[in-house]
Amino acid sequence: MKAFKRMKRTYGMAFGTLALLWTVLANSVVYGQAPAQMQAAQQVKEDFNEEELDRFLNANEKIAAIQIEAQGEMVKIIEKEGMSVEKFNAIAEAQQKADSAAAKQDPKDVAVFEKAAEQIYGMQQGLEGEMNKAVEEEGLKVETYMQIAQAYQQSEKVRGMLDKKMKEKQVEGGQVEQQ
């Protein structure tokens, strides 16, 4: 039973990584956000200077590129093991819910899932290190990056400032391309 719980937790984390990356990419959410319950309990810092916000956006662009690459690698791992991403996610979801669907899974599919999930889980530390490095290369502390990410989710003021900066960057980028 202990081994099953440990395995379930491990694969749940791997699924979480894959799901997180897709969520991040699909919703333009920034890396490293704490769960909503934890965020609600903390006060949100809003007094970031312009330089910090610019550095945050630059770091976030680098992180998005890392996440896109990682997503591709994760898909390759799953497909290399002979499973579709949809099936992988279905098994992971069933295991996380610990419902009767998990017990009904084909043992061969579960074995393939476990092998792929283990490889994906193994990627996590490296990804976290790459993302931390991207933040630090922009001259931000990871803690400050996380605070801005949290504020973006919870503070209309910070979200408005960052959205404005992102639009300005897009306009500047468009003008450079047109010249």
Image: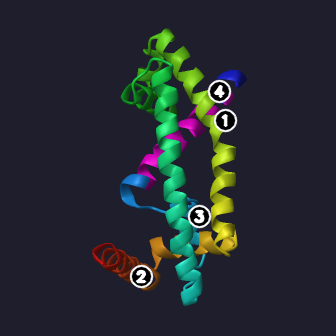
**How far apart in space, not on screen, are marks 3 and 2 (Cα)?**
27 Å
Neighbour class for label 4 at 10 Å: few (<14), some, many (≥20)? some
For badge 1, the amino acid type reads Gly
**How far apart in space, not on screen, are marks 2 and 1 (Cα)?**
36 Å
Which quadrant, please, contains the N terminus?
top right
Q: Give the label, 1 or 3, closer to the camera.
A: 1
- Residue 166 position, x and y percent, is 40, 76
Give the mark nearer the N terminus: 3 vs 4: 4
Query: Can you tell which quarter of the image residue 167 is in?
Result: bottom left
Q: Give the label, 2 or 4, closer to the camera.
A: 2
> Which label sits on residue 165?
2
Q: Report which residue position mark 4 lands on.
A: 7
Neighbour class for label 2 at 10 Å: few (<14), some, many (≥20)? some
- Give me the residue at 54% from left, 52% from top: 66
**How far apart in space, not on screen, are marks 1 and 4 (Cα)?**
14 Å
Neighbour class for label 3 at 10 Å: few (<14), some, many (≥20)? few
Q: Give the label, 1 or 4, closer to the camera.
A: 1
19 falls in the magenta region: yes
Q: Report which residue position mark 3 lands on.
A: 38
Marks 3,2: beta carbons within 8 A: no
Q: Give the label, 2 or 1, closer to the camera.
A: 2
- Give me the residue at 58% from left, 86% from top: 51
Q: Report which residue position mark 1 lands on.
A: 122
**How far apart in space, not on screen, are marks 3 and 4 (Cα)?**
26 Å
